[in-house]
Amino acid sequence: LKRECQEGVTSHKDMFAQLIPSNGGIDIPDVASRGISLDQLLDLVAFLPHICRSDHLDKEPRGHGLAKAELDEQCVNLYQVCDHIIKPATAERQCSYAEFVASSAEAQWPEWFCSHWWGEPVLHFIACAQHFLSLRGGGPVLWVCA
């Protein structure tokens, strides 16, 4: 994985700061230009064990998936990632996750569209995306139907 998640954080803001690039993320007005890179997906994977153990998560799910006490990084799905990572992380800026983690608009330009089932484990989705990109070559940026 690209980086390890830092231990000892004390708030949602501290937790999610680990995912933000040094420029603080950017606005990408064109939704079709909001791709996500393989490295950004792998950063999310590195963050999963920490978020699953965190005492700062909401204790109840917001309509999808499992309660916090049941989160397991090996089987956490996109409903849970959305409830416990994406929505809280992007709430203050009211932005997409791609904008939240973007360092430049050009780096987010997708070459491939990807559709998938939100109920599958996120690790399975990212492994499939990684395999697909290894076969296709080119820039590892996907526009993920999420």
Image: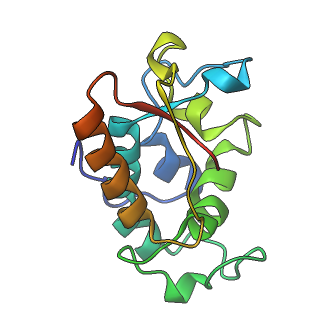
- At x 76%, y 73%, the residue is 62
* Front in this rendered view, residue 104 or 119: 119
Q: Going 71% across and 26% down the picture, which residue do you hit?
A: 31
Query: How many labels were placed on the picture?
Result: 0
Q: Which residue lies furthest to the bottom in this view?
A: 70
> Looking at the picture, does residue 92 appear above or below residue 141?
below
Q: In this view, does 23 lie above or below 37?
A: above
Q: Which of 4 and 144 is in front in this view?
A: 144
- Residue at image location 44% in from the left, 17% down from the top: 107
Image location of residue 84, percent across then percent down: 60, 65
In the foreground, 100 or 41:
41
- Closer to us: 50 or 136: 136
Q: Residue furthest front?
A: 136
* Residue 31 vertical position relative to residue 38 in the rendered view, above or below: above
Horizontal and vertical percent position of residue 17: 48, 41
State the image quarter where residue 85 is shown.
bottom right
Colour mode of the rendering? rainbow
Vertical position of residue 39 compared to residue 64: above or below = above
Q: Position of residue 115 (x, y in %)?
A: 58, 50
